[in-house]
Image (cartoon, rainbow, N blue to C red):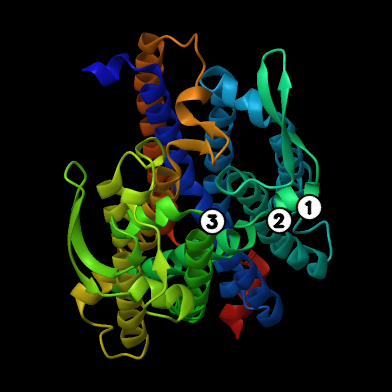
Amino acid sequence: MEALLDATFLARIQFAATCIFHYMFVPLSVGFGMVLAILFTKAYRSKDPKDESLAKFWLKLFTGTFAVGVASGITMEFQFGTNWADYARFVGDIFGAPLAAEALLAFFLESVFLGVLLFGAKKVSPKFYLASAWLVWLGSCLSALWIIIANSWMQTPAGYEVVATAAGTKAVLTDFFAAALNYTTLPRYFHTIVALLLMGALVAIAIGAYYKLKKRDVHAGDSLLRIGLVTGVVLAVVMLPAAHAQAVAVCENQPSKLAAMEGQWEDGPSDLSLFGWVDDENGVTYSLGIPGGTSFLATFDFSAEYQGLNSIPDEDQPDSINLIFQTYHLMVICYGLIWLVLLLGFLVYRGKLDTKKWALKFLQFGWLWPILAIQVGWMTAEFGRQPWIVWGELRTVDAASAAVDPVSLIITLALFAVVYTTIYVIWAKSLLKDVKKGPEALAPVADDKNEEEEVRA
């Protein structure tokens, strides 16, 4: 009950809830954008009406998802000024540049060319129309980049100095490129963007499996299954070096996060746990793993030593060690399940399991594993950063607005829950309705003259 009277705790819950909701649509937008560009390219090359219908069908799925993603992201920015005023004051000079760049260079790019796709099919050349599909995807990837730049600066700040002001201290930008390309920006973006694209690949597999299960829209089912499998396998392989690069960045820059991820209490080689449980109160980890495995993955040396939690001051330790440990290992488990989806998808595509309902239904829900991996992966990153909201510079407890009333936070959190649940239900029903109708519902209808000629033929 005491937590319900803690404004900082409630502000964290509110921001986390809105962020989780918003971040369900970001992976779909980026992943859908990849599939969208591929489908429009296929339609451009083949000139097949079925391919054109499939591209238009995917455009409908993308547009609805994009709209909800944009709308849900706005409320997060408002919270900076209401619940996190001290944080906004501290990072305002730093965050202004990437957030402005995200709006001007990414969001506008994505929005303008999405408009071309929706309304310009007969008003621009086929090549420009195709280029618009790729620019929409590029815009979504650039948008993710600028947000990652901002988040990575919070994790490993660079290119700044802290100055005193009448209202307190604030970070002032001294080197834009050092701040943007800070110690973890590139590995974090590499890791994140591969995960987002994997989401799109597995959704394509899921919809393709649905059509196969219903024995309809054969062309769409085969096309989506093939696109999802090819891109999914490539991305799942690329995820290995991407995850490795991100892990090395954590090892080098955030020792307390690394220790929490593996539940390491004493200094020494870091084990690679397969599963386990961390007793936070007693400082003990019960796990089954490979001794020195994490050290080897980071340095190719099983004996490489890393700092344990007992060597980190209590006030600088994350406040949820077991939660960080579990979310990190759940992310790894989800990666294994993604490979299982890809394996089953390959067997279905090759005709080995295409008549097995259990296999097709498993593929239908395969998208759950990348979205779960993405969500728990970010939980690992954000909980692991605690107690710092800006690593080494500003603690979370010092970043919250001092005048925020806990009661108002509870009320707004309840309102967010109601509104966001309603929005999600509307979006999900709309998307499922479009999927059930299928691409054939968007197929061009031949005019009477063409029909008469076909009858005579």
User: Crowding near pointer 2: few (<14 within 10 Å), some, many (20+)?
Assistant: some
**Quarter containing the N terminus:** top left
Q: Name the residue that disc number 3 marks.
A: 253
Labels 2 and 1 touching (C-beta < 8 A): yes
In the image shown, does 117 or 332 lie closer to the viewer? 332
The label nearer to you, 2 versus 3, is 3
Q: In this view, does 184 lie above or below 344?
A: above
Q: Is residue 32 left or right of residue 90?
A: left
What's the distance in space between the residues labelled 1 and 3, CA to CA? 19 Å
Three-letter amino acid code of the residue under disc 3: Asn
Residue 236 figure quarter: bottom left
User: Crowding near pointer 3: few (<14 within 10 Å), some, many (20+)?
Assistant: some
Residue 429 figure quarter: top left
Q: Name the residue that disc number 1 marks.
A: 177
Q: Is residue 402 above or below residue 440?
A: above
Q: Is residue 440 visible?
A: no
User: Crowding near pointer 1: few (<14 within 10 Å), some, many (20+)?
Assistant: few
* SS label for mark 2: loop
In the image shown, does 442 or 372 lie closer to the viewer? 372
Q: Is residue 36 visible?
A: yes
Q: In this view, does 455 lie to the left or right of 423?
A: right
**Quarter containing the C terminus:** bottom right
Residue 244: horizontal and vertical position, in percent? 48, 72
Q: Name the residue that disc number 2 marks.
A: 181
Residue 153: horizontal and vertical position, in percent? 63, 46
Residue 331: horizontal and vertical position, in percent? 34, 61
Q: Is residue 285 left or right of residue 174?
A: left
